[in-house]
Image (tube, helix red, strand yellow):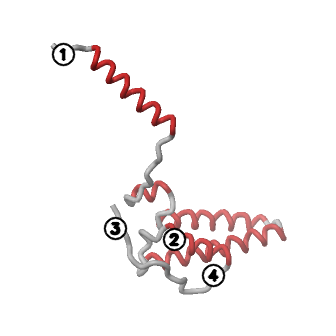
Amino acid sequence: PLEVVEGGYTEPARPLEFAGQQLWDSAMTTGGQWIARNTDTQLLLLTCEQMDRRTELIAKIAETQEWRLYRALHDLEKMISSNLGLLGFTPSDRTRMGMAEVKTRSKLEELMERKSKRVASTMADSNPAG
């Protein structure tokens, strides 16, 4: 399991646009336990800048409908997704890093567990030892 990283919120080293700043703020709060301030912030900053470029590309696509921009957007989104994984922002990567989220049990799961305990208890009571 990964150790918790100390440091709190860190400002980005370069200015970000809206989408990039949103990702940065979210990463600093959500990923604050595992984002290393001395090493991971460069990759995080790059990914935030990619998010800003993604917003720009989407706006250009809306204006021009140029097919090359669709390809560029697709490639950029693959890079963003990859970087988010490297930073631990996908469920499988959090599990790999030892940061798996605890699943809350549903009401159905609780009822099923109670029933199985009752059945096991009834079977033990009706089966005399001997």
Q: Quadrant of the C terminus?
A: top left
* Crowd tier of the residue under label 2, counting other residues whose Cα lies within 10 Å: few below 14, some 14–19, many 20 or above: few
3D distance between C-alphas at marks 3 and 2: 16 Å
For the point 81% across and 67% down, which residue is it? 62
Q: Nearer the viewer's eye, disc 2 or disc 1?
A: 1
Where residue 88 appears, x then y in whole percent? 47, 64
Where 8 sits versus 102, above or below?
A: below
Q: In which quarter of the image is residue 18?
A: bottom right
Give the label on residue 16, or none. 4
Q: What kind of element bears circle 1? A: loop
- Choose between 68 and 36: the one closer to the eye: 36
Give the label on residue 3, or none. 3
Q: What kind of element bears circle 3? A: loop
Taking the view exactly as shown, the residue that stands out farthest to the bottom is 14
Q: Earlier in the sequence, mark 3 or mark 2?
A: 3
- State the residue position of label 1: 129
Q: Which of marks 4 and 2 is nearer the N terminus?
A: 4
